[in-house]
Amino acid sequence: MVKGQKVVCINDTFNDFIRAIYLQLPVKGKTYTIREVFLGREKIVKGGESATVGILLEELVNPPDPFHAAKQELGFTSERFAPLEELPPEQEEVGEAVGAGAGAGFGYN
């Protein structure tokens, strides 16, 4: 995942603690834009041997993480999101032209 990439939320299940400290949470099925990618703190918080990849989203802004010394904004684990499959602009135009007539009655619009 990289800055500027479009992603879709695939998991919007949060516990009560998370709901209490975040101002805005992602919604399953909704598309977002990655604002920043950072190394998560799972090793520190859960004592594990692996770190996670965290992301901040353009569309959502949250308060600083109360447990982060540098007061970084509360982010989300990248595992809650899937990359949005986007067609290059030239293929997108062709797809729209074909879908507008041929697929009109079949939910392609």
Image (spheres, grey):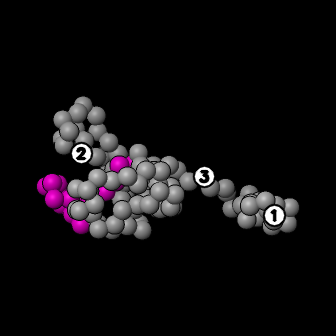
Extreme residue in the front direction: 16
- What whole-number distance in Å separates the C-alpha atoms at marks 3 and 2? 28 Å
Closer to the camera, 57 or 8?
8
**Disc 1 packing (10 Å; few <14; some 14–19; many ≥20):** few
Give the residue type that dot 1 points to.
Gly
Query: Which amino acid type is marked by label 2?
Result: Arg
Q: Residue at x 51, y 61 (%)?
A: 31
Q: Which mark is residue 105?
A: 1
Mark 2 secondary-structure assignment: loop
In the rendered image, residue 104, in percent from the top left (x then y), is placed at 81, 65
For the residue pair 79 and 28, the one nearer the viewer reads as 28
Q: Hey, what amino acid is under mark 3?
A: Glu
Name the residue located 28 percent from the left edge and 34 percent from the top edge.
50
Seen in the image, is 15 located left or right of residue 12? left
Q: Nearer the viewer, mark 1 or mark 2?
A: 1
Where is residue 63 drawn, in percent x and y?
24, 66
Q: Earlier in the sequence, mark 1 or mark 2?
A: 2
Residue 37 visible at all = no
Q: Residue furthest top?
A: 49
Q: Residue at label 3?
A: 85
Residue linked to disc 2: 41
Which of the 4 quarters of the picture holds residue 59? bottom left
The answer to which of 54 and 25 lies nearer the viewer is 25
